[in-house]
Image: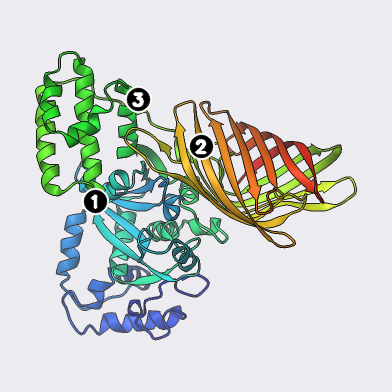
């Protein structure tokens, strides 16, 4: 119950007609059902609701309840053999807006040593964002247009889904729940099987429901109270850490991370051979016998080819028969080369070391002889100018980002009010050739007049990078709503220098041409310093062309901002 109202929306979950709204009515109806079982097998109330039954027996000291034989429940418990639990955080998916926040689900660890034999408890909307209109998907997700349902499936299947096909690194946070607490949670999950709740993208989502389950496991926890209106996956992990539930963590690299590692250690002169081996089988034997290529490099080439073959098969780019044939040939040839040192994947910075989602901004600036003061806030989540520690490189997703300015004439101005901004700069490489894109909806002062105007834009292009920096080139069609609606087209080139943890540099230059044949140049330079995990100092320079009537002039601005995240 939450404020006297159950968050389960499926009527089949309740015994009383008004059970969703009335806890007392549901309690009486449940007691009646338990004492008056109509069947004594898997359809019995005690078999369908073992958590309710156990809780009521403990609290009310119930006696003489009918004996029931729960074969399905016992079989499932034997298969799960629950001993402990792990909170799993798959990181963001760079080209999927629905997954750019990441995701959370629970792993129920069993008595078996291999974690792959464990089971995953997942909660998700009954929708496929890849097959639905993106705008419709977002709107329905925001306003409860989907049902959310729990699922229980082998952990290795979730790994295959997130780590292999969706290119998402995975962090595992082992929890200090006792075996009794884990069993209590699993019993409740059993009760929720087949039921549904209304799914809300920002509130009643995957992370919110994982917190619910942890509170069921340990009723003294109040994890959900930490949130006001939104629950994002990474924020939910912060809350679990704050409650001192995490005792250890581990990292599982995605296929993408593994293949990018091979790109770095394979000689550039040989790198093209990886894909060619999948296209020309005769090249495999010839490469194996090639004495001009060092043995270690040949091993890397075959290992990378096997990884890329598996990745291509999961993505549906290779037929099964061809996949099996190539897999056999490649693994056989690789085994014939003998053992070498296994490659080591550097563990990235733990997402828990990244900044929090809410941001407040204070600062001052200087524009054309005028001093300015700034006050701003952002509700969610991360921008390219924020510290990238713990976040996926080249991604940005912001909701409700506001900045106000105040000058000596006591005039309050709106610098920008971003409703939503999403950026996905997917760096292209030998094995990955995704495109980059961005979109923005809101108000800013980048139009030809020095006033805030509503704007919408969607850009697309390409990005390239290495360990020191990444660059991008984007074409941005845009609309501004001023005295009249004016269309424009922008060409932006940018670079982000992010090699070092404590500082980064963002530079972007833009050339715009508007429908009235007026041109505009914009240059933005930001130098950021990470003072602490949740404190950042930014120095900014902005150059922009303006028009006063028909006269063109240039404007320069220098700002110093302090960002605090919480």
**Residue furthest out toward the front:** 517
Is residue 296 rendered to the left or right of residue 444? Answer: left
Left or right: residue 309 versus residue 416 is: left
Q: CA distance from mark 2 to mark 1?
A: 35 Å
Q: Residues within 10 Å of mark 3 (few under 14, many from 20)?
A: few
- Distance in Å between CA atoms under marks 3 and 1: 29 Å
For disc 1, the marked residue is 157
* Residue designated by label 3: 264
Q: Is residue 329 left or right of residue 231?
A: left
Which-is-in-front pick, marks 2 and 1? Answer: 2
Q: Residue 555 at what x, y percent from top left? A: 78, 39
Mark 1 nearby-residue class (10 Å; few <14, some 14–19, many ≥20): few
Which comes sooner in the sequence, label 2 or label 1? 1
Q: Position of residue 223 (x, y in %)?
A: 49, 56
- The residue drawn where x is 50% and y is 59% is 224
- Decide which of tag 3 and tag 1 comes sooner along the chain: 1
Q: Secondary structure at mark 1?
A: helix
Determine which quarter of the picture holds residue 332.
Answer: top left
> Which label number is shown at residue 472?
2
């Amino acid at each position: 119950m939450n404020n006297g109202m159950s968050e389960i929306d499926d009527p089949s979950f309740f015994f009383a007609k008004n059970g969703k709204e009335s806890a007392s009515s549901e309690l009486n109806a449940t007691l009646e059902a338990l004492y008056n079982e109509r069947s004594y097998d898997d359809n019995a109330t005690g078999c369908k609701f073992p958590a309710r039954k156990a809780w009521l027996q403990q609290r009310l000291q119930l006696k003489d309840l009918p004996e029931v034989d729960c074969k399905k429940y016992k079989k499932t418990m034997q298969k799960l053999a629950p001993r402990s639990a792990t909170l799993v955080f798959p990181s963001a998916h760079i080209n999927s807006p629905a997954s750019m926040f990441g995701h959370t689900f629970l792993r129920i660890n069993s008595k078996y040593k291999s974690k792959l034999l464990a089971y995953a408890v997942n909660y998700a909307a009954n929708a496929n964002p890849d097959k639905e209109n993106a705008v419709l998907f977002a709107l329905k997700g925001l306003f409860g247009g989907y049902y959310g349902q729990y699922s229980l499936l082998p952990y290795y299947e979730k790994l295959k889904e997130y780590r292999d096909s969706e290119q998402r690194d995975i962090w595992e946070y082992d929890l200090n729940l006792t075996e009794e607490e884990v069993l209590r949670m699993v019993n409740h999950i059993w009760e929720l099987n087949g039921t549904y709740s209304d799914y809300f993208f920002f509130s009643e989502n995957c992370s919110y429901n994982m917190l619910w389950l942890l509170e069921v496991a340990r009723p003294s926890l109040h994890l959900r109270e930490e949130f006001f209106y939104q629950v994002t996956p990474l924020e939910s992990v912060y809350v679990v850490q704050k409650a001192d539930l995490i005792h250890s963590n581990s990292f599982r690299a995605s296929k993408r991370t593994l293949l990018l590692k091979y790109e770095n250690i394979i000689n550039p002169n040989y790198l093209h051979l990886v894909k060619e081996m999948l296209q020309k089988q005769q090249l495999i034997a010839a490469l194996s016998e090639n004495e001009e290529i060092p043995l270690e490099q040949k091993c890397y080439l075959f290992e990378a080819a096997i990884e890329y073959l598996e990745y291509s098969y999961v993505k549906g780019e290779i037929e099964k028969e061809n996949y099996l044939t190539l897999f056999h040939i490649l693994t056989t040839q690789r085994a014939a080369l003998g053992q070498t040192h296994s490659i080591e994947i550097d563990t990235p910075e733990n997402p828990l070391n990244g900044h929090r989602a809410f941001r407040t901004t204070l600062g001052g600036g200087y524009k054309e002889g005028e001093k300015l003061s700034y006050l701003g806030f952002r509700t969610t989540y991360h921008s390219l100018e924020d510290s990238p520690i713990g976040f996926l490189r080249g991604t940005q997703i912001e909701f409700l980002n506001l900045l106000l300015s105040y000058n000596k004439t006591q005039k309050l101005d709106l610098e920008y009010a971003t409703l939503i901004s999403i950026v996905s700069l997917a760096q292209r490489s030998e094995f990955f050739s995704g495109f980059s894109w961005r979109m923005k909806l809101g108000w800013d002062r980048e139009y030809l007049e020095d006033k805030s105007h509503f704007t919408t834009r969607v850009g697309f292009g390409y990005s390239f990078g290495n360990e020191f920096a990444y660059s991008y080139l984007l074409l941005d069609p845009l609309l501004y709503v001023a005295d009249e609606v004016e269309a424009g087209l922008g060409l932006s080139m940018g670079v982000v220098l992010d090699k070092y943890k404590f500082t980064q540099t963002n530079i972007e230059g833009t050339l715009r041409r508007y429908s009235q044949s007026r041109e505009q140049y914009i240059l933005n330079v930001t130098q950021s310093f990470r003072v602490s995990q949740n404190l950042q100092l930014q120095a900014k320079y902005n150059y922009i062309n303006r028009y006063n009537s028909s006269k063109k002039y240039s404007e320069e601005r220098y700002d110093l901002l302090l960002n605090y995240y919480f």
